[in-house]
């Protein structure tokens, strides 16, 4: 087992015991299909772009043993993120394999790589388990969305939502959140767009703060053990993604298990080569993105919503 023993892993810069999460039952396993993406959004927390290979594209043979291990451990759901998962040639086969075993959730930008695969995707509506899609539409404003994602992407992504919904899939929408927003007004603007496309306006809207690109250290406040017991309860700690999930990445040809979807840019969160090994390790809250989980419950998961 990989051992992490540096002092700053366990203690804050002032020497206090660092906050941590001990993982309970494994409920969700994420697969990072690779950092390649057809888009190159400047704010991307994965640093993705068409040529990016920080994390390798996954193949079906990479994923099968970990899906099988997760099933043995009683996992409830598989979730997939990237990059853009549909850039990976074998992604439809990966999704089909997983959906025969557990419900699945796919995070997608809803643009050409997905739209090109619609025939394969439609077949997944007949899988043994539900397949759900979360499409990223950053703002309910065409110009603001396309400033990051590129011309024409707003209509493509709305169209993807519509097509997926009409094909019988559960769909949700990922959006960007800013501290100074009028949340009710933002959500009303999304609802108007959804109605305009003939999509139910009560979709789950999952909002995310700006997590900063990989490798950036935002110098957020440090989280101590005392913080985790003063400002959080046993119940709220159980809602942190690292308390019930893991994320698998392919890094330079090796399948590795990370603590969650938000920390794959820091090798200290590489918890081993198998899910069992990873579950034995305590997760220290040292990444700057941990503060988003601590302060306002940031989570990519739909399991606890
Ligand atoms: S579409 Fe998503 S994964 Fe691709 S560059 Fe934009 S934010 Fe990153
Ligand atoms: S980012 Fe959040 S879920 Fe991930 S390790 Fe930190 S606290 Fe846990």
Image (spheres, rainbow, N blue to C red):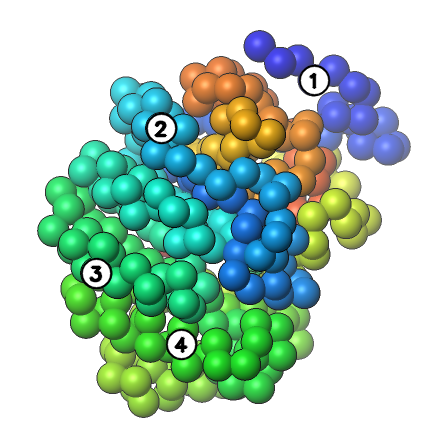
Q: Is mark 1 within 8 Å of ligand 2?
A: no
Residue 230 visible to an observer of this rendering: no
Residue 246 is situated, as x and y percent measured from the top left of the image, at: 47, 33
State the residue in front, 21 or 214: 214
Q: Does the residue labelled 4 lie within 8 Å of ligand 1?
A: no
For mark 2, give the secondary structure: helix
Quick one: label 4, few (<14), some, or many (20+) residues within 10 Å? some
The residue beneath circle 2 is: 61
Q: In this view, does 140 lie to the left or right of 191?
A: right
- Mark linked to residue 156: 4
The residue beneath circle 1 is: 4
Residue in view at x 59 percent, y 82 percent: 144
Q: Which of marks 1 and 4 is nearer the N terminus?
A: 1
Name the quadrant of the N terminus. Answer: top right
Residue in view at x 66 percent, y 76 percent: 180
State the residue in front, 265 or 33: 33
State the residue in front, 117 or 204: 117
Q: Earlier in the sequence, mark 1 or mark 2?
A: 1
For mark 1, give the secondary structure: loop
Which of pointers 1 and 3 indicates the residue nearer the eye?
3
Residue 181 is situated, as x and y percent measured from the top left of the image, at: 61, 78
Residue in view at x 79 percent, y 19 percent: 6
Quick one: label 3, few (<14), some, or many (20+) residues within 10 Å? few
Question: Could you give the CA–CA distance between mark 1 and mark 4, rounded to whole angstroms?
Answer: 44 Å
């Amino acid at each position: 087992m990989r051992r992490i023993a540096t002092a700053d892993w366990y203690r804050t810069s002032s020497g206090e015991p660092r906050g941590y999460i001990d993982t309970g039952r494994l409920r969700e396993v994420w697969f990072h299909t690779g950092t390649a993406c057809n888009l190159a959004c400047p704010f991307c927390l994965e640093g993705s772009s068409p040529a990016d290979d920080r994390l390798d594209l996954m193949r079906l043979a990479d994923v099968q043993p970990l899906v099988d291990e997760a099933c043995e451990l009683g996992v409830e759901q598989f979730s997939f993120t990237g990059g853009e998962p549909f850039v990976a040639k074998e992604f439809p086969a990966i999704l089909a394999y997983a959906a025969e075993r557990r419900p699945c959730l796919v995070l997608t930008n809803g643009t050409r790589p997905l739209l090109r695969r619609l025939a394969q995707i439609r077949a997944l509506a007949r899988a043994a388990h539900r397949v759900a899609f979360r499409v990223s539409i950053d703002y309910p404003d065409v110009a603001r969305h396309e400033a990051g994602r590129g011309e024409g992407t707003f209509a493509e992504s709305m169209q993807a939502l519509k097509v997926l919904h009409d094909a019988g899939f559960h769909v949700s929408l990922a959006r960007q959140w800013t501290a100074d927003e009028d949340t009710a007004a933002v959500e009303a603007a999304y609802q108007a767009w959804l109605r305009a496309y003939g999509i139910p306006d009560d979709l789950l809207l999952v909002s995310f703060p700006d997590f900063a690109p990989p490798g950036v250290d935002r110098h957020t406040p440090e989280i101590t053990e005392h913080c985790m017991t003063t400002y959080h309860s046993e119940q709220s700690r159980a809602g942190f993604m690292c308390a019930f999930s893991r994320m698998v990445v392919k890094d330079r040809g090796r399948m590795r298990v990370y603590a969650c979807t938000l920390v794959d840019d820091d090798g200290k969160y590489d918890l081993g080569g198998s899910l069992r090994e990873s579950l034995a390790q305590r997760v220290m809250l040292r990444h700057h993105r941990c503060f988003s989980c601590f302060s306002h419950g940031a989570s990519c998961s739909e399991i606890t919503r």
